[in-house]
Image (spheres, rainbow, N blue to C red):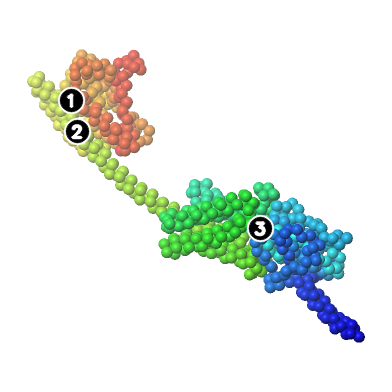
Amino acid sequence: MKRNSYSQILAPLLLLAAVLILSNHAAWASPISVDDKDVRYRSHGRDLEYIIDKDDALTPQEVLRTTGKSKNSHETPNLGLTKLPIWVKFRVTNHTSSDRLMIYYPVSYVTTISYYDSTEFGHFEPSLINGVNLSHAKVLQDPGYHFNLFIQPGETRTVLFRLKADQQILLGYEVGTETTMRGKHWSNSVILYGMFIGILLVMILYNLVIYFVTRINLYLYYVVYVTFSLLAQSSLLGIYQTFFPLLGEKYNYMAMYLFVVCVALSGNFFVIRFINIKENMPRFKWAYYGVNISYVVTGIFILAGKYLVATVLLQANAFYCAVLILWCSFYIGFWKKDRSAQILFVAWLVFMGGLILYVLKDFGLVPLNWFTTNIVAVGTALETVLLSLALADLINRMREESQLSLNRVFLEEQKNANLKLRLKRSELASLQGQMNPHFVFNALSSIQNDILKEDLPSAYSSIGQFAQLMRKGLEHSRASMTSLQSEMSFLKNYMELEQKRFASRFSFEVEAEPQLLKDDVNLPPLMIQPICENAIKHGFNNDSNGLLSVRFSYHGNDAVLCVVEDNGVGIKKSSKNKVKKSDKKSYGLAIVEDRIRLFTEQDLTARMTVTDLSEISDATGTRVELVLPIG
């Protein structure tokens, strides 16, 4: 009777305990119910259990017998940073008409994700092992991971996964029919990823073309930064690993970390030069150098395979670098009124907004969905476009400043050139003025010779010719240019006067092309007379029957060629006679040479060539070719 009373008391208690245990188990184990609706069913924290394999030794059967933890308060449980394997189990009920369902895990950067399926004997074995370095094993070419679930309509089955990663482990799954998952897994992603990659590629090509056109290094630095941003974001989204693993599939995980480091280093390198940190905030350049050293150390840990340490360093460096760039761009932009820094500040705020949402998603503070998963890519694309606009604005202002500087330099050079030109003209006028007393001296010598011979009629005639030459000489010495006809008349008068001085020594002729006379060209005065004087004085002997010819013709469109030729002894023999007689230097020819030098310094066509005819033919004499600019 007593035993029966105990039994009557214990039986309800045991029944109550069993009900409580089952109800507690059912609280976490509410199955994900899938029907024929064309939707994807997302698992929640209440739908799954997770078990941390602290010794990395649990078997699937032990996991099934172990009651795990659940995070009912979060849609997407975040287990934080851990190197330990995580087992996840949940149940799926198939209310569809198909026996083929599909499970999707959206996080692309897990090291390994193993899907365990039950055998006909009730054991669980891995049916598919996947991960960031095993992209070839994916069921669908998608940044995430898909797994086939074969389950009969109306059946409920337990699903078992084993995860391992060196980053935050997020627990969020989607379940749907195979048709739904295959048909819609790219519906939103293909648009976003296509736009993201397209925008960054356009920015890369656009700025690369500008670099090759302008050769401004800032464009090249920006292209390098955007290129690494494209690779890094593609890795974080799983695009790089799935479609173009440039470094090889087995290095996908390492490449993802290295790309992030390269983005930081190239970004800092670009920012320092873009807002001119060295001049605007010289003390802060050391802050950038320090964070760059930290990123290099992070890269060493990545190459050594210490991804967990590298993750912590990357997060710390990213926070420090973000604050540093925001402060520098704000100070330079709004305190020093630099427009490029203002645009950088806005661009960086846009990127930081996306990054903050992404991090909050990692810590479970905002839900894991399509938007929060891809928000960093959106922020990166917007930042890239804004920075391209800022870079274009900066280069335009640099060009304006450069043009203003060039204009100032040009005006200064023009001022100096005008000053030099005035000095040259003054020097030329001084030399030209020296021709007049030189000519007067020689003309008076001819008149003196007639007076000494007591040939008064000839002396009177010479004085008349001398007066005309004096008037012409004064006119020529004051003018920079004279007409060809005036110059020819002047030369004829001069040589007639010299013929009286050196009787029967020479005859002369002065000719010009008809077109020259018709065009009425002007040329520098008092350039030909010293050459004629030199030929008369040194080329002819007292008993010679010399001929002195002066011919004018066009030399191109901007110059006149004057050829003065005599049949005298020649320049070589004349030079020897000068040495024997110790003749003084011909000042007239020296002045002509100086004037030619001044013409050429003003970029005018002018030169003088002297040829001894005995060197090129059997004749004797000298030919002087004088090229003079047309005024």
Place of residue 108 in the rendered image (x, y in percent of width and height, measured from the top left): 69, 58
- Of helix, strand and loop, which one carries label 2? helix
Residue 431 image-quadrant placement: top left
Instruction: Report how far apart the C-alphas of labels 2 and 1 lie in the structure.
Output: 20 Å
**Nearer mark to the viewer, of 3 and 1:** 3
Compared with residue 247, is residue 339 higher up or lower down, i.e. above or below?
below
Q: Residues within 10 Å of mark 3 (few under 14, many from 20)?
A: many
Task: Kindly identify the amino acid type of the residue bearing the numbered disc 1.
Answer: Leu
Q: Quadrant of residue 564?
A: top left
Which is more foreground, mark 3 or mark 2?
3
Which residue is disc 2 drawn over?
434
Mark carried by residue 595: none
Residue 331 visible to the viewer:
yes
Front position among marks 2 and 1? 2
Whether residues under marks 3 and 2 lie with C-beta atoms below 8 angstroms apart, the answer is no
Q: Which residue is mark 3?
A: 166
- The residue sitting at 86% across, 69% down in the picture is 154
Q: Position of residue 420 (x, y in %)?
A: 28, 42
Q: Residue at x 26, y 22 (%)?
A: 548
Q: Position of residue 368 (x, y in %)?
A: 67, 67
Tag 3–tag 1 contact (CB < 8 Å): no
The residue closer to the viewer here, 402 or 422, is 402
Pointer 1: what residue?
A: 497
Residue furthest front in the image: 2
Is residue 180 toward the left or the right of residue 529 in the image? right
Quadrant location of the N terminus in the rendered image: bottom right
Q: Earlier in the sequence, mark 2 or mark 1?
A: 2
Report which quarter residue 534 is drawn in: top left
Does residue 239 appear to the left or right of 286 in the view shown? right
